Every structure is written in C-alpha cells, then in structure tokens.
Amino acid sequence: MQVTPTTTWLKNPLDIFTGEHADAGGGVVISGSQILEVVARGAAPSMAVDEVFDASRHVIIPGLINTHHHFYQTLTRAWRPVVSAELFPWLQGLYGVWAGLTPRDLELATTAALAELLLSGCTTAADHHYLFPDGLEAGIDVQVEVVRTLGMRATLTRGSMSLGEDDGGLPPQRTVQDADTILADSERLVGAYHERGDGAQVQIGLAPCSPFSVTTDVMRETAELAERLDVRLHTHLAETLDEEAFCRERFGLRTVDYLESVGWLSDRTWLAHGIHFDDDEIARLGRAGTAVAHCATSNMRLASGIARAVELEEGGAPVGLGVDGSASNDGSNMIQEVRQALYLQRLRYGASSVTPERALGWATAGSARALGRADLGVLAPGRQADLAMFTLDDLRFSGSHDPIAALLLCGAERADRVMVGGSWRVVDGAIVGLDLDRLIAHHSEAARGLLARHR
C-alpha cells in the first residue's frame, strides 16, 4: 500500500533566503522529500497541510553545499610543525603523517567532518580523498557508509596520486598508486555507489589530486573514463604560484593550458581554489563552463592568494564555496566559510559588489551548479527539501536589523534545525541519532594515535 507523504508548512519565518528572490515570507510547504510551494508573505498555502511548524524565530536558507573538503584531515588540525607553513612545505610535512591512516581513523575523521558541516547548516558535501596507503584501499567505501548513517548528501571523489618524489612529484612514494589500480578502482566505485537523478544521496566523482602529484597519462585517462561513465571531474588547480612554476617547468604550460591539454577544460570539471588565473584564462574557463570551488579560509591560512570569484562568475564559470581540508582551515563550518568568502572578496571587489546575498548564493545555487546538481541550492517548488534554519537569539545578534545579513555579519555558527530531503537531521542544535561527546572522545584518541605512529 502506497503511503501518502506528510505535508508540512514551515510557517512565517523571521526571514527567508530562497536563492530565487521569490516572495516567500509566508514560508515553504514540503511534501515528502521535495518543496511543494513557496508561500507569499501574509498568505496561506494553496493546499491543505498535515503539519504546521512555527518558524517565526527562524531564518531559513537553502542547505549549504560544500564543494571541496578532505575529511581525513580533521585528525591533523593545528599541528604545530606546519601551523605557519605555506602549501608545498605544509604538504611535505603532513604527507608522512597521513600515510599512517587506518580505516577506523578515516571513519571517525569523516564522521567528525560531516557532523561539523551538518551543524553549520550544510546538507551536501564534496570530499576529495586521494590517500590510499596499504590497508586503506576501501577508503571511499568507508565514507559512503558514514554519509548514509548521518543522512546527508555527498559527492565523494575517488582521488589519486601517481607522481611520487622519485619521479619529480611532491608526495612520498608510499602514498602513490599505479594508473591501472587507480582507474580500476574508480570504475568499481562508480558502479557500486553512484546514484543518478534528482534526490541522489551519494555520487562519485573522479579526482586526480593535482598537477604536481599525478602523471599526465592519469589525468588524461581519468578524463576519458569520466566521459564514458558520465561522472564529474575534480582537481586542485592554480592554488599557488609554486604550482604555476611547477607546471611551467614540467609541462612547459600554464595551469589552464595544461588543463586543456589533458581534456579537462569542460563543464564536467570543477576546480579547487582557482586563484592564479589571468584574464584570458578566466574567459576560457567561463566559455567552457568549468566551475571553481572558492576556499577563502584555506587560501588565507596558507597565504595562497585571493581568487577572482566575481570575475569568474560574471565570465560564466560557476562559483561555489568549500571549507577545504580541516588541516588548512582548520574547521568544517560552512556558514562561517560564507562569512569569510564575503569579507575576502570584498577586499578585492569592494563592499557593494559582494553582498551577503551574493555570498550565500555561492554557497547554495553556485555550489549546486559546481557539483552538477539541478535539484539543490534554491528553495523552489520541485527542488529537494534541503534547508537550514538559524535563530538569532544569541547575544551576537542583539541589535541586528536585517536577519539575512545578520547571519554573516554577526557571525552565525550553528544551525538550530537542518533538513535533508524532507527529514530533520538537526533538531534543537543537535544531530539526530549521534552521540557527539562519544564521537569527540574517539576522534581525539584517533588523532593522538595517528601522530604517535608517525613519531
């Protein structure tokens, strides 16, 4: 017997950001996993509803979408030897630590990252996992189970490193894999876990780590495999001037020229960071529809530079936001990342060009475009019922007047409620079904163990 979905009206919120500039002051109506209706201020739903939730204390926004992360790095936050290092020495200092990851470490690290994201209003996260030392060959499989347990959505990318120190790359040899292993496992994971269509919970992307850690052949063959399997492509690009110098020396090309030479300059691709592009490269990325994940906090933490996010967006390249790995941020708080992006981009373009609504748009509709998700990112009929609800009861908000602006300008940190696909995953600031104290204890123990093994 078919069960009729419950219809719920989130009624008369304090304010609402739909991402489509619709008058939705009366709230939203949800049926099953989808948004059925946005209600105009002062109006009532056009249909009967089963439940009414009084949202008068809440600011409602679409679920935030994180387009770049490294979940495993939550185990190496604020590690003293690399606290003040820039990207290349930072990586060289940490590769040896990360090579000791176990499946249990990855399970706890992924849970901690996703829990922190969820509590900050994030409903969909993309992870870039490229470390598969002995014993961690099934790392993506571990992550899939954690995503399903927490009830979030994720694009889990099968990363790779094949260019080790012995061949002129950056990572140590024990962290690299051969091309056949990488491509075979990539195809296995897509076949096992990739979901298609609206409402997909788990999707798989293919993600060679970077030009300085993967061979040209692996880059090219991965692009061909992604085309055949119809999945997305992801990599780091143009994060630092050191990377640009590496590409010039090794390939005789700037980063975007290299990207095009291996078949990656397309709307299937989204790039992490994308800081050091010139005017012509921005235009080429825009024409191709290649997206960029702007990681403001990480870019400041590692002194990498300021991405040209406004010019990329206006040139046709979708711009999303990412918290990046929790060893270069060192957190996984998505609403705080929106605030950082707002402020960093104002340094480049001025306050009037980068409004709170524009920054929220990067973290919602822009991020959805970067991940190829037409069903997420805005609150509109037919879209998935993924949303975050914040209260403005804390002292930090006292005296504020514009609720949407206050989320960013006054520094919101934690959502009161979060819904994914019509299901409440955070209620009263707590994740449904998760013992957070227990997670913190086990995660902290794993972090200490990882460093102890490194010594």
Image (cartoon, helix red, strand yellow):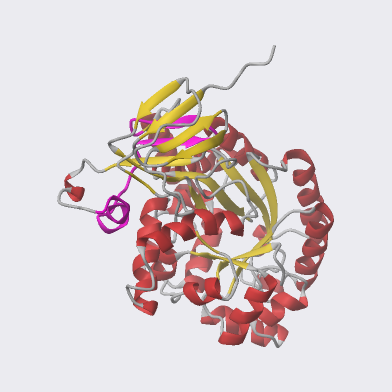
Q: Is residue 327 magenta?
A: no
Residue closest to the eye, 438 or 445: 438
Q: Is residue 68 above or below residue 433?
A: below
Q: Is residue 304 left or right of residue 104?
A: left
Q: Residue at x 51, y 40 (%)?
A: 386
| Residue 358: x %, y % from top left | 42, 63
The answer to whether residue 231 is visible is: yes
Q: How many callouts does the rendering have? A: 0
Residue closest to the eye, 394 or 208: 394
Q: Residue at x 41, y 32 (%)?
A: 44
Image quadrant of residue 130?
bottom right
| Residue 447: x %, y % from top left | 44, 45
Residue numbers of the magenta segment? 402-429
| Residue 323: x %, y % from top left | 46, 57
Q: Is residue 205 above or below residue 278?
A: above
| Residue 55: x %, y % from top left | 33, 34
Q: Residue at x 48, y 73 (%)?
A: 310
Q: Residue at x 44, y 69 (%)?
A: 299
Q: Is residue 159 left or right of residue 150?
A: right
Image quadrant of residue 171?
bottom right
Q: In what quadrant of the picture does the N terminus appear?
A: top right
The answer to whether residue 68 is visible is: no
Image quadrant of residue 355?
bottom left
Q: Is residue 424 magenta?
A: yes
Q: Is residue 204 left or right of residue 317?
A: right
Residue closest to the eye, 259 or 136: 259
